[in-house]
């Protein structure tokens, strides 16, 4: 799998992501500066977390206008895979590559803690190594993770089975208490129509090493390696 | 700004009559306004350490693993594998009272710069905070602002905030303490210093533009708050963590080349202190052309530019043949880059603006004749012994009260707002272990980090309290299995012109020194913040200690959370010391007695034993015994883990409440699979140890048979902050 | 000329900040307070002397960057 | 009545948001852009029909809570 990580000014989880990818792929990902415009030959483009442009206007707003976004759109249009985590998710919604928007957390505070995610479907390359309906643990760290979309959009997302993950209890119950940032319908991550673009708020890349307290996030990256290596061969 | 320079103006700038007379002698004429400004900030308490220097010199600062002790922007220690840890703690107390969010945020920004200016990538932040009475509305506003500010800055720059401490006491009502610590990692052969060299070399300004921010902040930080501090408010500095992030990346990128001769952040007194210190340390002269300084506001004067404390700026002496490459790096990161002067052989600082020489000062006298005071001091009187105190409530009720009180309540509300995992190297997050554990990227090696101080002990006995702060930092590192290496200190005290305050300072320094020597735990950097008082009411003396230790393999680290099926072993002797204990304050309503004595030999002995047990794999969890005593320590292990515990009665010769709540030092609780083996090893080593009970599935059962549910304990422990703030 | 762009959350989008401010004001004893909404204002210095042109430019900036039309609406005033 | 409180950083206080927005707009190719400043706007529904009273109330809310007078200034408009 050929993977690249896009780096905008102010992004700060690109190293975490590179470590997680390297652990699964066995090779360092390519780091792409936001002014580059060539993303040819890649299987996976990752937009990592952080505070692009300080998140000073709206999270992800300024990054979504960067030169590299044209190439990312082209990659998406080609049917390429994209993973946007945290700020990456915000950037993808700001760019219109995923629907909805991420508002301030409902309690107006930054939230940094572990959460549990229920896997809504296990038949995408992102979740192939999880169980549908299963739960995994993931760190999260964000001030604006409150997923919002209008009711028709939410209905469509659910109707098309495009919700990737929901905030849940460790036992898998989708409850209000588990939904700390106030996201609509507990949504923590969503797919594009073709299921090749995934945006999510939590940070599975920070839980891929037993030393850091677990490997719950690793199946996501292992799944990508298995799945994307296959599709390219096919 | 056509102010006449005279003694009255000098006084307004914070210079005494003697100091001003000295300025006149050095200059041989009346200084210009800009010159007076330069003298006043360089000779301020904040920059010159004039009241504390004689005492700081007595601190032990060396060890085979110390690469750079105090005197550089931060301390540097050898952590093995060719790597160095670079760290320092710094206060931002006064700004945090005026504007809690921005004060705390810019405090974090400032200490980050002190660390990355030496070539280190910052890998962890900690903070030591002291606030006033939680019953006051203003305290709530300050806590909220400070916590948001620390998170707002640290989260955005992408450095994990992994630890710290918080105390409440009415003495901090008008003067909270915000001490921020940063730890970074560099290759030992890539450490950058601030001594300028190379006559003719360009002086380069990078980062943000200069505005009229915080002019006279350094002198401000050196004056106590009175009623008129509202008017004296300098323009508050606003932090820009996004620019700081760019500055970190740009500086590290430049540091990977051979372009830099010397580099220093612009901290307090900005352009003045950075240029004066760099040239002074290098024994060269410096000439600045202020027309070239990137400016945010129109019409700034030389005085304003030299004294501005605008944030996110650095000064670099660059090799002339690398100037273009350096510029390209900063332009890539959208940062200002300007050549604002060059080094000379004159030994003077010359400042030009619009063709006029606004300042021309000889550097040696400016540094060498900086005021140095041997302030009069009086020894703090010893507290009378406490005598016997009866237990009014019993163990269970006292435990419930204690774990719910502001000083012991869970701080999770705070650390839940700090990104503690960014970087992907945080092995033990806040609350998981006595010291935070952060791994070094790509290696097995990890650092153990903590901050500690018990101000009520320092007030009651500065020497014992100073020693205790160091000992507790050492113990917290030891309790994870790490080897303690060195400390940074942040000396927060009240007005040094008062002999009893200076006596506190002197006593604390003596105690810190003794502990550093006994524990092989030298001071490598630090900061002094004086005049922390409001309308004559001093803060508790607060020498905050930031400790750093190293673990060869992060997998060896133990946390404090209990799992079921283990034996609980207490290491260290228990006399049942209730003087200055939290039990005495919260349960008996008395703040009396001497604090627990610190037996440094026992600290060392017990700690080395515990670390040995951990590193040989005999220990599943470990927690040091500090505030609240033994029962609180066990309760904290229970709440942090997934088990209850059944406790045995203590020895007959110590009353139950003194045994369980006394704050005797040099103690640890270990959770081990096999108590007999550990007790035998302890006996063999001559370390006092006893079996306390065992961890079980279910409740915490006290020696008197009372059972407390772990969930109820957690609820009581979590209540304070959430009920107060949410 | 100076253009002032005001960006507010659309009706129907939850505004926790506005709500929190309203509660805090009530806590301070202010009475008779109805709905409170929080938004952003961006002041732009734009070269030019033709009001409609500057207005159009500011509107384009708002559409492209300053407001997220999924959740926000904006208005522009040129002085 | 509706009171609109606009809160801006005082002149001379660093405005990182405004700076970043200005740079982003320039990056998008907008020309002739001078200073950009970012602020907050809070819309308040206040019971009452006397404009000066409502204005005074809103001003007090701004002083007490909505603006941080150490670094910000505000203006109130009642419609
Ligand atoms: N209490 C202290 N103990 C040890 N060293 C100290 C102490 N206070 C200051 N120092 C050292 O003095 C030097 C100057 O500190 P400081 O003025 O805070 O630096 P900066 O200019 O970066 O703010 C640093 O090397 C610092 O580590
Ligand atoms: Mg410095």
Image: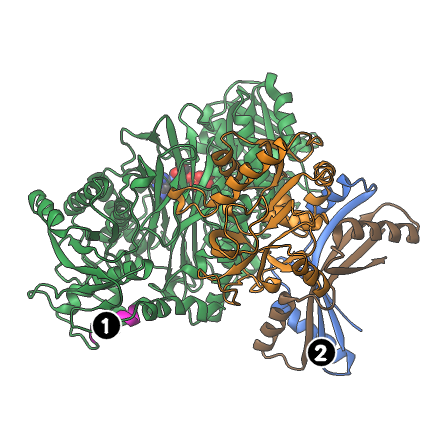
Chain colours: A orange, B green, C brown, D blue
- The percent position of residue B153, horizontal first and vertical second, equals 54, 49
Q: Are callouts 1 and 2 both on one chain?
A: no
Asked whether residue B5 appears in the rendered view, the answer is no
Label 2 sits on a secondary structure element that is strand
* Quarter occupied by residue B608: top left
Q: Is residue A47 left or right of residue B666?
A: right
| Residue at the spot of label 1 | B707
- The percent position of residue B89, horizontal first and vertical second, equals 41, 44
Q: Which residues are magenta?
A: B394-402
Chain at numbered mark 2: D
Residue at x 49% of width, y 44% of height: A219
Q: Residue lying at the far front in this picture: please name it.
A: A234
Q: Is residue B160 magenta?
A: no
Q: Residues within 10 Å of mark 2 (few under 14, many from 20)?
A: many
| Residue at the spot of label 2 | D46
* C-alpha span from label 1 to label 2: 54 Å
User: Mark 1: is the Cβ under 8 angstroms from ligand 1?
Assistant: no
Q: Is residue B687 left or right of residue B88?
A: left
Question: What is the number of the mark on residue A74?
Answer: none
Residue at x 35% of width, y 27% of height: B81
């Amino acid at each position: 799998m050929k993977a690249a990580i896009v780096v905008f000014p102010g992004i700060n989880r690109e190293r975490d992501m590179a470590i997680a990818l390297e652990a699964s792929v066995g090779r360092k990902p390519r780091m792409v500066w936001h002014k580059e415009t060539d993303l040819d030959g890649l299987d996976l483009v990752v937009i990592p977390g952080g505070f692009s442009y300080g998140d000073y206007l709206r999270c992800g707003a300024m990054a979504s206008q960067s030169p590299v976004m044209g190439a990312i759109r082209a990659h998406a249009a080609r049917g390429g895979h994209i993973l946007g985590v945290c700020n990456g998710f915000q950037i993808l919604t700001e760019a219109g590559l995923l629907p909805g928007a991420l508002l301030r957390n409902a309690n107006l505070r930054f939230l940094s803690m572990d959460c549990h995610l229920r896997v809504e479907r296990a038949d995408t390359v992102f979740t192939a190594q999880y169980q549908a309906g299963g739960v995994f643990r993931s760190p999260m760290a964000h001030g604006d993770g409150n997923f919002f979309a209008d009711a028709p959009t939410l209905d469509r997302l659910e109707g098309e089975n495009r919700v990737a993950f929901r905030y849940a209890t460790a036992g898998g119950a989708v409850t209000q208490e588990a939904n700390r940032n106030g996201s609509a319908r507990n949504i923590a991550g969503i797919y594009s129509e073709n299921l090749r673009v995934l945006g999510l708020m939590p940070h599975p890349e920070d839980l891929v090493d037993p030393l850091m307290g677990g490997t719950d996030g690793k199946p996501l990256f292992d799944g990508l390696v298995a799945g994307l290596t296959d599709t390219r061969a096919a | 700004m056509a102010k006449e320079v005279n003694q009255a103006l000098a006084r307004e700038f914070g210079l005494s009559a003697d100091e001003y007379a000295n300025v006149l002698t050095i200059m041989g004429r009346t200084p210009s306004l800009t010159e007076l400004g330069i003298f006043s900030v360089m000779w301020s308490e904040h920059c010159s350490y004039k009241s504390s220097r004689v005492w700081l010199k007595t601190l032990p600062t060396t060890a085979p693993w110390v690469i750079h002790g105090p005197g550089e922007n931060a301390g540097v220690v050898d952590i093995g594998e060719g790597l160095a840890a670079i760290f320092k703690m710094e206060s931002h107390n006064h700004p945090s009272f005026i504007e809690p969010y921005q004060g705390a945020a810019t405090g974090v920004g400032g200490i980050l710069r002190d660390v990355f200016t030496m070539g280190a990538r910052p890998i962890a932040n900690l903070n030591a905070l002291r606030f006033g009475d939680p019953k006051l509305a203003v305290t709530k506003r300050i806590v909220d602002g400070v916590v948001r500010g620390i998170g707002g800055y640290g989260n955005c720059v992408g450095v994990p905030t992994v630890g710290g401490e918080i105390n409440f006491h009415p003495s901090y009502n008008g003067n909270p303490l915000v001490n921020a610590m940063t730890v970074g990692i560099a290759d030992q052969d890539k450490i950058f210093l601030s001594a300028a060299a190379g006559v003719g070399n360009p002086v380069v300004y990078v980062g943000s533009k200069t505005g009229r921010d915080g002019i006279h902040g350094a002198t401000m930080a050196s004056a106590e708050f009175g009623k008129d501090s509202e008017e004296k408010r300098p323009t508050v500095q606003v932090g820009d963590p996004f620019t700081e992030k760019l500055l970190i990346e740009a500086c590290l990128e430049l540091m990977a080349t051979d372009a830099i001769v010397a580099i220093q952040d612009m901290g307090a007194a900005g352009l003045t202190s950075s240029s004066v210190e760099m040239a002074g340390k290098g024994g060269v002269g410096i000439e600045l052309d202020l027309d070239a300084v990137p400016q945010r506001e129109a019409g700034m004067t030389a005085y304003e530019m030299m004294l501005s404390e605008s944030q996110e700026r650095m000064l670099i002496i660059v090799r002339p043949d690398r100037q273009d490459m350096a510029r390209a790096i900063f332009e890539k990161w959208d940062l200002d880059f300007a050549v604002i002067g060059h080094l000379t052989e004159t030994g003077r600082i010359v400042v030009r603006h619009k063709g006029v020489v606004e300042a021309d000062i000889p550097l040696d006298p400016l540094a060498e004749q900086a005021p140095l005071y041997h302030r009069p001091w009086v020894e703090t009187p010893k507290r009378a012994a406490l005598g016997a105190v009866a237990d009014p409530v019993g163990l269970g009720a006292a435990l419930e009260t204690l774990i719910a009180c502001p000083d012991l309540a869970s701080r999770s509300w705070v650390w839940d707002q700090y990104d503690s995992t960014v970087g992907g190297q945080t092995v033990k997050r806040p609350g998981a272990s006595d010291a935070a554990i952060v791994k070094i990227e790509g290696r097995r090696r990890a650092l153990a980090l903590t901050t500690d101080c018990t101000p009520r002990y320092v007030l009651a006995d500065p020497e014992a309290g100073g020693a205790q702060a160091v000992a507790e930092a050492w113990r917290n590192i030891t309790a994870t299995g790490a080897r303690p290496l060195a400390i940074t200190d942040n000396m927060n005290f009240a007005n040094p012109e008062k002999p009893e305050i200076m006596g506190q300072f002197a006593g604390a320094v003596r105690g810190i020194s003794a502990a550093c020597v006994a524990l092989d735990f030298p001071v490598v950097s630090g900061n002094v913040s004086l005049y922390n008082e409001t309308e004559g009411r001093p803060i508790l003396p607060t020498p905050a200690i930031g400790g750093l230790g190293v673990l060869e393999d992060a997998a060896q680290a133990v946390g404090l959370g209990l799992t079921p099926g283990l034996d609980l072993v207490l290491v260290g002797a228990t006399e049942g010391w209730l003087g200055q204990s939290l039990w005495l304050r919260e349960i008996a309503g008395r703040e009396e007695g001497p604090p627990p004595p610190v037996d440094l030999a026992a600290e060392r002995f017990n700690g080395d034993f515990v670390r040995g047990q951990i590193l040989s794999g005999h220990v599943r969890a470990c927690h040091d015994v500090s505030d609240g005593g033994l029962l609180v320590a066990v309760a904290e292990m229970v709440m942090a883990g997934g088990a209850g515990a059944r406790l045995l009665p203590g020895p007959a010769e110590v009353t139950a409440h003194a045994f369980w709540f006394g704050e005797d030092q040099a103690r640890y609780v270990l959770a081990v699979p096999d108590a007999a083996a550990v007790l035998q090893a302890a006996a063999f080593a001559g370390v006092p140890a006893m079996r306390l009970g065992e961890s079980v599935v279910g409740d915490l059962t006290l020696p008197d048979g009372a059972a407390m549910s772990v969930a109820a304990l957690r609820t009581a422990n979590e209540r304070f902050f959430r009920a107060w703030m949410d | 000329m100076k253009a002032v762009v005001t960006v507010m959350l659309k009706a129907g989008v939850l505004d926790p900040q506005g709500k929190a401010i309203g509660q805090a004001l009530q806590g301070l004893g202010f009475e008779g307070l109805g709905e409170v909404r929080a938004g952003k204002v961006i002041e732009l210095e734009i070269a030019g002397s033709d009001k409609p042109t500057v207005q159009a430019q500011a509107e384009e900036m708002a559409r492209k960057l300053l407001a997220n039309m999924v959740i926000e609406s904006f208005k522009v005033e040129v002085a």
